[in-house]
Image (cartoon, grey):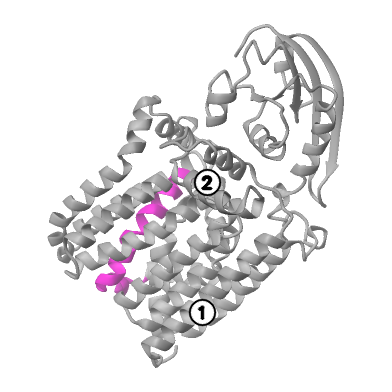
Amino acid sequence: MTSPPRIPSSDRTATTAFAAILALTVFRWVTLTESHLNLQFDEAQYWDWSRHVAFGYVSKPPMIAWVIGLTTHLFGDSEAAIRAAAPLLHAAAAFALYALGTRMFNRLTGFWAGLTYATLPSVSYSSLIISTDAVLLPFWTLALGLYWSICQRQGGKGRAAGLGLCIGAGLLAKYAMVYFILGMAVHIALSRDARHARRYLLIAAGVALLTIAPNLIWNLSNGWATFSHTADNADWQGIRKGGFGPMLEFLAGQIGIIGPVPAALALWLGLRNRTVRDARMVFLACFSLPVLLIVIVQSLIAGAHINWAAPAYVALVLAVCAWAVQRAQILLGISLIFNMAVLVLCCFLFAGFVSPNAMPRNTDVFAKLRGWDKTAQLIDGVMATHQDYSLLFDERKFAVLFNYYLRDRPYHIVIWPFKGKRHSQFAMTNSVDLQTGKKTILVSRWHEPGVEHTFLHVQPLETFTQRLGRDDIRTFHVWKCEDLLQAP
């Protein structure tokens, strides 16, 4: 244990925090410009949305498409331009967490919270791709600070309106922002000091509703498509019968999300009775524990992606840093060294300065971002002799990826809807029909995809096989298909 450290001056702490987070952001931007890695399929899908601005899309709310639309308008359609906002968005969340930590505890806690967040392994990865989490977390963190101010009687109607705007914008980024509303409800139920804030929450609710209204109207006009897709992702009808394995795998993944030291400190805090005596710790627990518990249950029932609990770690990081600053600041230094090592390795691997073949087996986290442009060139070679044919895919991720890497070509790219359902935005606008199915080139990773049997004439053309690294071999089969018998 260490004695409480001397807190440096406000100017020095703020300047150091700003300089450190800015340096990390610039380093990540340079990494993006130096990288030759391709898009992952979610990014390619969001890019396609950005070309058709709307208030909603089938699988996600619209803000990520708006963000990509802005960056590509400014910088072009390269991979780096599509991802350009990610480092800046995480930097904004780190600054907001610094400000909240300073107000709730002290300047040193704010400094460590902002810097710890900015160097989390998950943030190091997420800053190099564009995702809905990157868009959500700045609004989540700003909303957390505004709600704390209201609870402390440090703001009235203006901050309540700002809170509502952040909640509404967060919902436009990702529906996981609804966890924030749950956190407020739990906090009001547990904290007597927060109950006076309820009158201001009516203002926040009104502003949030106005902000999200265009997306609600879009969903109403499109059969509540995004809400249905979100419910399908939860997949509670497909309850697992495999025991606790998926849940344990999810929990192990959370250590990778925040690093081993913060994970151990968070567990220690959760086991300490004295933690609940501090109103500030109770506040932070209300915005972390309910999210974690819900997603852990989800992982047990039907599985969960490791990033689904990401919003919980904003409050959790602040709680861990507040405790460690007063009692074991050296642990934060150890965590920072570990996180910086992961950050540098992640950026060097992303930029190509470290060969994936030099990594241990099955540790190349960027394997799925390799080789799509080269495969597109092979497909382009086939299409060069079939220019009056449409290009058909039987999986959404391949349709949107090659739609991006063949974006300068005149090919009409269509998709075979999954089980006849237009379960994606691309399928809504680019599903194969009897017209486009007259003459198609079908590309599939399956040796017998099944959809080729719905054409009158089918002829195998080529098989592409690429080795993309030590652990990844990618194969595609190509058919010439003519005269679709029945549209899906």
Query: In the image, is 156 to the left or to the right of 357?
Result: left
Please name whichever residue, 370 or 289, is drawn nearer the observer in this view of the structure: 370
Image location of residue 2, percent across then percent down: 44, 90
Q: Amino acid at mark 1?
A: Ala
Locate the N terminus and report the quarter of the image it occupies. Answer: bottom left
Q: Which mark is residue 19?
A: 1
Looking at the picture, how far across and down is residue 108, in whole percent?
40, 83
Query: Does label 2 or label 1 sit earlier along the sequence?
Result: 1
Give the quarter of the image for residue 225: top left
Which residue shows up at 51% across the image and 52% down it? 307
Residue 464 x, y percent position in the rendering: 85, 34
Q: Percent x, y for residue 222?
A: 40, 25
Identify the residue shown where x is 38% and y is 67%: 270
Which secondary structure, mark 1? Answer: helix
Q: CA distance from mark 2 to mark 1?
A: 29 Å
Q: Which residues are magenta?
A: 272-299
Amino acid at circle 2: Gly
Q: Is residue 291 magenta?
A: yes
